[in-house]
Amino acid sequence: MLFSDRIDLGLLCIIALVVILGLTRRRVYPLPLPPAPPALPFLGNALQLDTKRPWLTYTAWGKTYGKIVYCRTFGINLIIINSEATAWELLDRRSRNYSSRPVIPTSELAGVDFNTVFLPYGETLRRHHKIFHQVLRAEASASHHEIYSRHANELVVNLLDVTSDWQHQTEIYAASLIMAVTYGYLAHGHEDPFLSRARELYDIGEHIASPKKAAMLIAFPFLKKLLLWCFGGAFSLMGRSRELAQQLLNEPFNEVKAQMDTMKAVALTGYLVGMDTTASALQTFLLAMVLYPDVQARARAELDQAVKHDRVPCLYDRASMPYLDAILREVLRWYPVVPLGIPHVASNDDVYDGYFIPKGAMVMVNQWALSRDEDIFPDASRFDPSRHLTVDGKLKDPFVNHFAFGHGRRICPGRWFAENSLWTAAAAILAVLRIDHAKDSNGNKFEVKPEFTTGLAIHPEPFQCSFEIVNAARERHLRAMVNSN
């Protein structure tokens, strides 16, 4: 029996159990819940969801039912926020009530429950955030400018020299950069054992810790004891995931003789999260440069005006290049890396706009809906960096305020590092390379479409493109710096 067939069989068994057991009695609420689509008995709205891209279902519901929508799946209360204003009101202004996370059983089973992103609000999270603030706050992140530049230069050289799988080079850039900052460790390309183990761990996590499986285990905790029966091969993958997590938690710190548990968890969280999100954003940037050559040309013209002809830009040049910042803001808006964000949980009952939000409800910001809000982003499917600039060409809002970094007390603590690493890589690429469509042997361009993977975090589907040197002086200067390291 195929693995997917066993998953489907497990789902059918769970649905049968739901119908037989009738779930639990529903609580009577003092005020109406937010507007909701019609639901089935027992199952709620589970069968109405696009399970691969649920953010599309939630966005469609938002157009029908409003900026805040209620749904129920396998007995779990979900509050979906489809508006930036609503997200700010609840998650920022009322952050005391919405700063915790739901318990995700698959995280514990996979051995990654140390991850800062998924920790409940409390003392452990505060210790993690304190360390993140010390290492990755704005001033500390800016101090790593030489590390950013060194890795960005290596990325440009690798993009020029590789003959295939350029997407993998963006992953190496993101992973090796975060390793250098968090561990002081110099990674050795794609063959580095730490990089390969981290990629394997992340891929397993994407497979076994999907929102669908997590929802089932939240609704039915007893299923943890039935995983071998319901999920087949996923059970052995969880064992491998726990093994990898322990190796990655301990081995890098053995390298530097440090064994503090909190530091280990914080460092690996930053590594795993930063590696994937930065690589995804870089790949989306390159996709946009292929599809919108006019945007690429304007960015390069700005760069050439701000930076001498034979010099590669660095963070000190950033203030004079607002259009590049606007491009990166648009990258995160155009295709948000985590379209549904990371769920919050209501610690206590609350009332918003006359609607009741029950204690324990999952509260999710549908970043996809925010990115497609035509009132704020007209012609939202088009990649248009100018929407982030004032009429006199200045950036409207700081990069770190972007909704892609989350809200309230759970806003991404590594957002300054993320923006600096993205900016440095994009600037180095544009300074030396022109990104264009790849061509076949007859000179015909390969078609490129903005198609993306599914899951908690998304990436552009692999596409072909070409890299052409547009500034030989900068290329020589860049290679000289890489060779001298």
Image: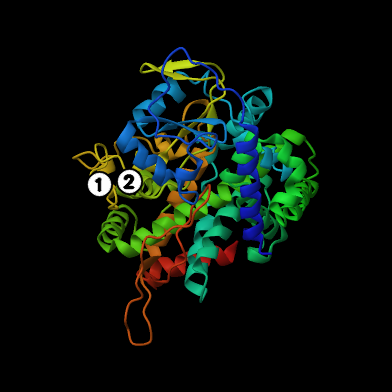
Question: The residue tagged with tag 2: helix, strand or loop?
Answer: helix
> Which residue is nearer to you in this view: 245 or 344?
344
Position of residue 68 relative to residue 147, above or below, is: above
Q: Is residue 284 left or right of residue 12?
A: left
Whether 377 is drawn above or below 98: the answer is below
Instruction: Kindly give the residue lying farthest to the left in the view shown.
Output: 391
* Residue pictured at 35% horizontal, 32% vertical: 83
Q: Amino acid at mark 2?
A: Ala
Does 348 appear above or below 445? above
What residue would you read off at disc 1?
386
300 sits left or right of 90 in the view: left
Residue drawn at x 57%, y 36% as measured from the top left: 74
Residue at the outermost front position: 20
| Pointer 2 with pointer 1, Cβ within 8 A | yes
Residue bearing the label numbered 2? 326
Residue located 31% across and 52% down the image: 306
In percent of width and height, residue 341 lies at: 49, 39
Residue 418 marker: none
Q: Residue 307's quadrant in the figure?
A: bottom left
Could you say which is closer to the camera, residue 474 or residue 430? 430
